[in-house]
Image: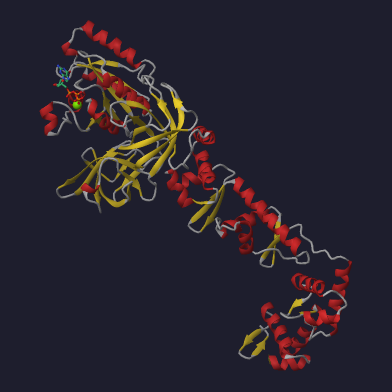
C-alpha cells in the first residue's frame, strides 16, 4: 500500500480547515484559542480513505501571515499539496507565499480547491479560477485541476475526492534513504502511555522496540508503541504520519525541531552547503553575509549566508552557498529548506542541501561550488568521494555513514569503483584513489631510500618503520597502511622479505671489493665451522676496511648465506654437519643436553647454544627441560 501525506496551503480564512473537516469529518482546530479566534494556529492532522483503500494523511496548515513558519514545518514531508483559494476573496498574499514555499520544498504535484463557491455566482467563480490559473503558471500546479467546492453545501466534494485519488495514484512514494527520520511536530504526555510525539516519517522505517536517537538534542529513547492514524501498528514507514510512544524521555524534553532518528544514523549539522534560489518576487538581491532564518524539517534556526560562486544573488537567480547555522539541525543531502527574513516578515527563497557537514569556506570559493556541482550531478557516489576528499585520510565506514545519513549497505554499494574499502573486523576503512596513489608512492620512495642506505640488505622496512616514514603525523591507521602495502605486493611492486617489505626490483649486488670480502668471510667461517669468527674477529683479521666488512657480513646474514648465530654467522655447510652429528646422536640416545652437544662439536657453550636455538626455531628438535629431542 502506498504511504502518502497531503497538505493544505493557502491564505487565512480561505476555508482550509473547513475543507479538511468536510472531507474527513475531523475538526483539526482543537485549541480553545483557535475556536475563539476562528483561525488555525497549530498544525492539524487528519486522514482520508480513498476508494482504492489507500489511507492518506492530511496536514492542515494555518494561513495567518504570522504562522508561516508553522506552515513550513507542516509542509515539510508532504507528498502533494491542496492549494485552497476562496472564490469570494481570490488570490491573496499567503496564497502566493505558500505556493512559493511549496515550490521551494520541491513539491511536484497537487490540486487546487476553489472554496466557498456557494458565496459567489458562476461568473465570479470562473473569474477567480482564471486568476488562480495565472498565479500558478510556471509552477508545479500549472496543470493542476481547479475544483470548485463548498464545505457548507457539500457541492464539489465528490469531484474533489476523485481528483485527490487521481493525484495520489500518480504521486511517487518518497525515497529519502533507508535510515529513519521523523521530524517531531508535536510532543505531549498521554495518561497511561507517557511521552507521545507525532510527525511524518520522512525516510526509512521504525519498529516497536527500536532504539532511537533524538537529534540535535542528543537524547536516546526506545519506541514503546506506534500508531498510524489512531491504529496501533508494529512499524511505521516513510510517507506515513505516525504517533510514537517513547520510553526513556520526558515529553517536555522534546520540541518541534527535534528529529527521531535511526540510532547512530545521523550527526547534527551546524553548517550546510547547498544550492539556493532567491524568489523572483523579491525586490532586492541577497548579499553575502546576510542573516537569515533557516527552516529545515520542523526546525528553524538563524543562519548567516556565505555565497560561494558570486558576490550577490539577484531575484530569480540560483547559486551555491554555505549557511552557517546558529543552532544545529538534522540535515541530509537532498533535503529542501526555506530561507526567510530573520523577523519572519517574508519568505526570501530556499534551497537544497548537498553537503550536511562541509568544511568552512571563505567567500566565493569556486572549488567548493564545483565539488557541490559534482554531488548534484552524481549523487551518493560523488558525496562519498567528497567526504574522503575533505578528510584527506582514510575514513572509517562507521564515521562516514552518519556524516552522509546513509546506511552502511548503501555506502558500500554506491561508492565509486575506484574508492577502496578495507574491511577491519566489524568496520572498514574507505579511502580515495588519489590518497592511495599518494601513499603508495611515498611507500615506494621510502623503500627506495632504505635500499639506497643499505644496498647490501635484502630486507626493507617493517610496516611500523614505513608508517614512521610515510606518515609521521600518524594520520593513517597501521592496518590501512598494511592494506595499501598488500595491494602494492599484489601488484608486484613490493615483496615481503622476513617481516619487512622491500621493493620487488631490489637486488643485493656486490661490487668487486664486496665480492672479495664475501668470499673471505665465507671461507673464514667455514674454516672454524663450529666456532666461526665474530664480526669483530673478521674486522681484525681480514685486510679490508671494517665498515665494508660489517655491511657485507650483515648482508650475508640477512640473505641467509650465513646462518645467523647472533654474534657470528655459521656457514650453512657447518650447520648441516652439526645437524648430521646431532641427529645420529639423538637416534641412538634419544636426548641430549646443550653441554653434551658442546662437547660433541668441540666448541664453546655460546656457539653450541646458538646452533641449538637455530634447530629449535627450525623445529628440528624440541625442548624438554634441559634436554633436546627429535620431534
Ligand atoms: N460559506 C462558506 N463558508 C465557508 C466555506 N469554507 C469555510 N467557510 C468559512 O470560512 C471561515 C474560515 O474557514 P476556515 O476553514 O477556518 O479557514 P482556514 O483557511 O482554515 O483559516 P486559517 O486556518 O486561519 O488560515 C469559517 O467561518 C468557515 O465556516 C465554504 O465553502 N462556504
Ligand atoms: Mg485553518
User: Which quadrant: the C terminus?
Assistant: bottom right
Residue in view at x 47 percent, y 44 percent: 410
Seen from this angle, which residue lies furthest top? 123
Most foreground residue, 54 or 220: 220
Give residue 598's quadrant in the image. bottom right
Relative to 40, residue 122 above or below: above
Relative vertical location of residue 600 with respect to residue 439 in this rendering, above or below:
below
Q: Report the front residue among 299 and 379.
A: 299
Does 65 sit above or below residue 271?
Answer: above
Residue at x 11% of width, y 29% of height: 35
> Residue 414, can we see it?
no
The N terminus - image quarter: top left
Q: Quadrant of residue 611?
A: bottom right
Foreground residue, 607 or 81? Answer: 607
Residue at x 82% of width, y 63% of height: 509
Is residue 429 in view from this perspective?
Answer: yes
- Number of numbered discs overlaid on the protein picture: 0
Q: Is residue 446 left or right of residue 143?
A: right
Where residue 296 appears, as percent x and y from the top left, is 34, 36
Picture colour scheme: secondary structure
Quadrant observed for ligand 1 in the rendered image? top left
Compared with 28, 145 (above or below) is above
Which residue does the image show at 50% across and 59% down from the upper left? 425
**Residue 628: percent from left, percent from top:** 66, 88
* In this rendering, position of residue 598 left or right of residue 197: right
Q: Nearer the viewer, residue 585 or 432?
A: 432
Residue 403's x, y, as percent?
44, 46
| Residue 492 rendering spot, x and y as whole percentages | 71, 54
Amino acid at each position: 500500500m502506498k504511504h502518502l501525506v497531503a497538505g493544505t496551503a493557502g491564505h487565512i480564512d480561505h476555508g482550509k480547515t473547513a475543507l479538511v473537516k468536510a472531507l474527513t469529518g475531523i475538526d483539526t482546530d482543537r485549541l480553545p484559542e483557535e475556536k475563539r479566534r476562528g483561525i488555525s494556529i497549530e498544525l492539524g492532522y487528519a486522514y482520508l480513505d480513498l476508494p482504492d483503500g489507500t489511507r492518506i494523511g492530511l496536514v492542515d496548515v494555518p494561513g495567518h501571515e504570522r504562522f508561516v513558519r508553522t506552515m513550513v514545518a507542516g509542509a515539510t514531508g508532504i507528498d502533494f499539496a491542496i492549494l485552497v483559494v476562496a472564490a469570494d476573496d481570490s488570490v491573496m498574499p499567503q496564497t502566493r507565499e505558500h505556493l512559493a514555499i511549496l515550490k521551494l520544498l520541491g513539491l511536484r504535484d497537487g490540486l487546487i480547491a476553489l472554496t466557498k463557491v456557494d458565496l459567489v455566482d458562476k461568473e465570479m467563480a470562473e473569474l477567480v479560477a482564471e486568476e488562480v490559473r495565472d498565479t500558478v503558471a510556471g509552477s508545479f500546479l500549472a496543470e493542476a485541476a481547479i475544483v470548485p467546492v463548498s464545505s457548507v453545501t457539500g457541492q464539489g466534494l465528490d469531484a474533489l475526492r476523485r481528483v485527490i485519488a487521481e493525484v495520489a495514484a500518480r504521486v511517487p512514494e518518497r525515497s529519502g534513504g533507508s535510515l529513519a527520520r521523523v521530524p517531531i511536530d508535536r510532543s505531549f504526555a498521554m495518561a497511561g502511555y507517557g511521552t507521545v510525539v507525532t510527525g511524518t516519517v520522512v525516510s526509512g522505517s521504525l519498529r516497536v522496540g527500536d532504539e532511537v536517537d533524538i537529534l540535535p538534542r542528543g537524547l536516546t529513547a526506545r519506541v514503546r508503541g506506534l500508531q498510524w492514524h489512531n491504529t496501533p501498528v508494529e512499524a511505521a514507514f516513510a510517507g506515513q504520519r505516525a504517533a510514537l510512544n517513547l520510553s526513556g524521555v520526558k515529553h517536555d524534553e522534546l520540541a518541534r525541531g527535534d528529529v527521531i532518528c535511526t540510532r547512530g544514523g545521523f550527526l547534527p549539522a551546524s553548517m550546510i552547503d547547498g544550492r539556493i534560489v532567491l524568489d523572483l518576487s523579491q525586490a532586492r538581491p541577497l548579499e553575502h553575509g546576510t542573516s537569515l532564518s533557516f527552516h529545515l524539517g520542523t526546525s528553524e534556526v538563524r543562519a548567516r549566508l556565505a555565497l560561494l560562486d558570486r558576490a550577490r544573488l539577484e531575484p530569480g537567480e540560483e547559486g551555491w552557498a554555505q549557511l552557517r547555522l546558529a543552532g544545529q539541525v538534522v540535515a541530509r543531502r537532498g533535503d529542501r529548506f526555506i530561507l526567510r527574513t530573520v523577523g519572519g516578515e517574508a519568505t526570501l527563497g530556499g534551497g537544497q542541501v548537498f553537503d550536511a557537514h562541509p568544511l568552512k569556506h571563505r567567500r566565493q570559493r569556486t572549488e567548493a561550488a564545483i565539488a557541490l556541482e559534482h554531488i548534484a550531478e552524481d549523487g551518493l557516489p560523488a558525496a562519498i568521494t567528497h567526504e574522503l576528499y575533505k578528510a584527506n585520510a582514510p575514513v572509517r565506514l562507521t564515521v562516514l555513514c552518519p556524516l552522509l545519513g546513509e546506511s552502511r549497505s548503501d555506502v558500500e554499494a554506491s561508492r565509486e569503483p575506484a574508492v577502496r574499502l578495507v574491511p577491519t573486523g566489524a568496520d572498514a576503512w574507505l579511502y580515495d584513489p588519489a590518497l592511495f596513489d599518494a601513499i603508495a608512492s611515498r611507500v615506494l620512495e621510502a623503500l627506495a631510500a632504505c635500499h639506497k642506505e643499505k644496498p647490501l640488505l635484502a630486507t626493507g622496512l617493517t610496516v611500523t618503520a614505513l608508517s614512521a616514514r610515510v606518515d609521521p603525523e600518524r594520520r593513517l591507521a597501521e592496518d590501512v597502511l598494511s592494506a595499501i602495502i598488500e595491494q602494492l605486493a599484489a601488484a608486484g611492486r613490493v615483496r615481503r622479505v622476513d617481516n619487512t617489505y622491500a621493493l620487488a626490483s631490489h637486488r643485493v649486488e656486490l661490487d668487486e671489493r664486496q665480492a672479495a670480502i664475501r668470499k673471505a668471510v665465507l671461507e673464514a667461517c667455514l674454516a672454524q665451522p663450529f666456532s666461526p669468527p665474530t664480526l669483530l674477529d673478521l674486522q681484525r683479521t681480514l685486510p679490508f676496511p671494517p665498515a665494508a666488512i660489517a655491511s657485507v657480513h650483515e648482508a650475508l646474514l640477512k640473505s641467509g648465506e650465513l646462518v645467523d648465530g647472533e654474534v657470528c654467522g655459521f656457514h650453512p655447510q657447518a650447520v648441516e654437519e652439526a645437524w648430521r652429528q646431532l641427529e645420529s646422536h639423538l637416534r641412538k640416545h634419544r636426548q641430549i643436553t646443550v653441554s653434551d652437544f658442546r662437547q660433541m662439536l668441540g666448541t664453546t657453550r655460546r656457539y653450541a647454544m646458538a646452533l641449538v636455538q637455530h634447530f629449535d626455531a627450525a623445529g628440528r628438535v624440541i625442548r624438554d627441560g634441559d634436554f633436546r629431542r627429535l620431534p
